[in-house]
């Protein structure tokens, strides 16, 4: 009986109610109504004063008065987002209200009574729900009750991938349907969809493993471009991954070395001490008593990678079709180019030994250490190396305090080690996340240990020199040189690329660049990155592939610095090595006593400027 009056009112005010209904339908997928927010904003300018629409106050239906009284008595059933509506209800109860207040409430009731049940009963909604339910049930049964053959497993992986992508696309389209971008409701809905989508992608990466975890790790490193919900939601992929069963590891070991594990090791821990996207690590002991770490590739990974890369390419193509601002095909191109090298552990072993040779003239073994390789137990899918005792991850501040290791010196050494690789040696470790760099006490105070040498980049003299000029020019804010070098590297939007390289807004007055950022500046940068996401992905798709890997390494190193509190200005440390390479190259082109004197003068003047910057930049 009570709702009959609502129905009659809806017939009388059909046009107004139907207009509101359309808007409600478009935001209905959010599990809260948000109607009061929409209508509250619509009437906010008029309801601040207690002026009725007409001079004559309309009579209020007793049934409506009863409904209002019940609602006021049960305010707890409304969410926090209905505060404006509750104020309207209180006013109605006190002053007999106006027609406008009545409309607000009735439209809300209309939604609850007619619109929402209609959506839930709609055939399309029912069919989509049943399809998703049946697909989920099918995948669950096959995965947990059976051991399907490889081709069925591949089909499940493909099905899972497109199912999650479809869910994400529908969630975005449905949840943000016809919401105005600048409104609070849009921001709230977008935040929730970002969180849900990130969790779905994390689940997909953990289930499909391999290429999908590598892709998730790359996304997690883009913390100044992508929304925080994605970078934080996918962060677990950096140091957590699914582990392979020991029986499969035993079989892979037998296939690779034609001998069982016991032939090489006196003890071998069945439970891995670490698991990554491509492999897992077991602690073992050789027959001579030496402790080693055995890194074993996940069984079946090489067979999966080619198909997974193709699936990833199709997923991105589908996503780009629905979201026109998304341009991520360059990510697939990178996987196609680099995965074969990362899957070859013989290549990784050679890289580790070469890095030792490259760094040893500049850093002592007590400062930087690379574990030694045991070649007799190393193949394309197995690598055995020295086990590192008493070490912890580079971002573990508690352990540093415990061992009285100065954080600022650790940050300085990390910056110097990787600046040496990038600007002077041209042989660069391109995956330096916190799981691949360890720290431990040593005779000189502390030692950093570099692991996982699968992904490297060799820079030719042209790239090395131009990148050095670009970095130095950005720090000293030489716009003409920035533009000139960027053009040589095929980068048209040099301001945007400067932001990508330094994670700082392009400001010509910020000479020297403070490595620390205020919370406000950081939020502005994130907002800028999200607002210009389409342009950023376009730049990343056009930039030289070697520069792209340097950007990735740069982002990962910056993440470590941020985790340690940025106690040193790593921009200055990088600039020292970049400028040194620039000056040395000029000297090598025209070697003479006069040029050597010019080089010495320029270098010492540069060091004076750097000292001044460090003195004035906090």
Image (cartoon, grey):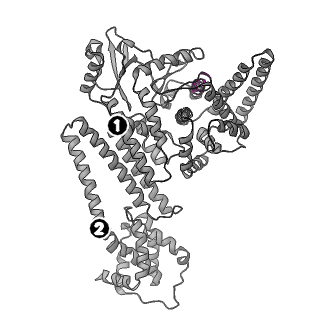
Compared to 286, does 172 lie above or below? below
Answer with left or right where residue 12 lies relative to residue 447: left
Q: Return the residue nearer the eye: 72 or 191.
A: 191
Residue 497 location, quadrant: top right
The local secondary structure at tag 2 comes to loop
Q: Which residues are magenta?
A: 412-427
Q: Position of residue 266 (x, y in %)?
A: 28, 13
Compared to 184, does 428 lie above or below? above
Q: Residues within 10 Å of mark 1 (few under 14, many from 20)?
A: some
Which numbered tag is attached to residue 400? none
Which numbered tag is attached to residue 307? 1
Residue 236 on the magenta span: no
Q: Return the residue nearer the eye: 194 or 46.
A: 194
Q: Residues within 10 Å of mark 2 (few under 14, many from 20)?
A: few
Residue 414 on the magenta span: yes
Answer with left or right where residue 470 lies relative to residue 215: right
Which residue does the image show at 26% across and 38% down from the upper left?
Answer: 153
Q: Return the residue nearer the eye: 5 or 601.
A: 601
* Disc 2 target residue: 122
Farthest-out residue, right: 594
* Sequence order check, earlier mark of 1 and 2: 2
- Nearer the camera: disc 1 or disc 2: 1
Compute the Cα span from label 1 to label 2.
38 Å
């Amino acid at each position: 009986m009570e709702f009959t009056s609502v129905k009659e009112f809806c017939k009388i005010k059909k046009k107004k109610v139907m207009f509101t209904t359309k808007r409600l339908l478009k935001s209905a997928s959010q599990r809260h109504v948000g109607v009061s927010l929409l209508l509250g904003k619509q009437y906010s300018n008029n309801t601040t004063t207690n002026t009725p629409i007409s001079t004559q106050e309309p009579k209020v239906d007793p049934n409506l008065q009863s409904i209002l009284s019940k609602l006021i008595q049960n305010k707890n059933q409304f969410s926090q987002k209905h505060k404006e509506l509750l104020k309207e209800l209180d006013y109605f109860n006190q002053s007999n209200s106006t027609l406008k207040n009545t409309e607000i409430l009735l439209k809300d009731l209309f939604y609850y009574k007619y619109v929402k049940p209609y959506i839930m009963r709609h055939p399309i909604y029912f069919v989509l729900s049943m399809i998703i339910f049946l697909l989920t049930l099918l995948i669950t049964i096959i995965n947990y009750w059976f051991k399907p053959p490889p081709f069925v497993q591949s089909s499940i992986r493909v099905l899972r991938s497109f199912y999650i992508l479809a869910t994400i696309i529908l969630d975005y389209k449905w949840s943000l349907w016809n919401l105005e971008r600048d409104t609070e409701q849009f921001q709230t809905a977008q935040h929730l969809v970002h969180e849900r989508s990130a969790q779905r992608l994390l689940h997909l990466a953990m289930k499909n493993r391999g290429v999908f975890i590598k892709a998730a790790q790359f996304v997690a490193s883009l913390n100044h471009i992508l929304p925080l919900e994605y970078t934080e939601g996918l962060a677990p992929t950096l140091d957590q991954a699914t582990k392979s069963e020991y029986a499969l590891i035993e079989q892979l070991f037998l296939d690779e070395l034609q001998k069982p594990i016991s032939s090489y090791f006196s003890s071998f821990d069945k439970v891995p001490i670490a698991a990554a996207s491509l492999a897992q690590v077991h602690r073992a002991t050789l027959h001579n008593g030496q402790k080693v770490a055995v890194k074993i590739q996940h069984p079946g990974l090489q067979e999966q990678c080619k198909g997974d890369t193709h699936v990833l390419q199709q997923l991105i193509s589908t996503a780009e079709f629905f979201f026109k601002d998304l341009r991520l095909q360059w990510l697939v191109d990178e996987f196609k180019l680099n995965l074969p090298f990362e899957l070859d552990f013989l290549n990784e072993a050679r890289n580790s030994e070469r890095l030792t040779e490259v760094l040893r003239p500049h850093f002592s073994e007590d400062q930087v250490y690379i574990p030694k390789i045991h070649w007799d137990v190393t193949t394309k899918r197995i690598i055995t190396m020295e086990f590192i005792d008493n070490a912890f991850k580079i971002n573990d501040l508690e352990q540093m305090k415990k061992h009285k290791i100065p954080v600022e010196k650790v940050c300085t050494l990390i910056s110097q080690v990787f600046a040496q690789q990038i600007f002077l040696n041209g042989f660069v470790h391109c995956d330096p996340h916190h799981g691949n760099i360890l720290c431990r006490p040593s005779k000189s105070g502390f030692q950093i240990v570099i692991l996982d040498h699968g992904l490297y980049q060799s820079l030719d003299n042209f790239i090395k020199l131009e990148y050095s000029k670009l970095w130095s020019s950005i720090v000293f804010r030489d716009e003409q040189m920035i533009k000139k070098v960027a053009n040589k590297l095929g980068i048209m939007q040099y301001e945007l690329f400067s932001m990508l390289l330094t994670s700082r807004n392009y400001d010509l007055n910020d000479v020297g660049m403070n490595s620390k950022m205020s919370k406000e500046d950081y939020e502005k940068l994130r907002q800028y990155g999200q607002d210009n996401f389409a342009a950023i992905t376009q730049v990343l798709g056009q930039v030289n592939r070697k520069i792209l890997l340097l950007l990735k390494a740069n982002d990962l190193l910056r993440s470590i610095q941020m985790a340690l509190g940025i106690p040193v200005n790593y921009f200055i440390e990088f600039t020292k090595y970049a400028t040194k390479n620039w000056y040395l190259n000029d000297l090598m082109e025209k070697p003479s006593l006069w040029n050597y004197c010019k080089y010495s003068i320029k270098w010492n003047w540069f060091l004076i400027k750097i000292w001044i910057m460090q003195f004035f930049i906090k």
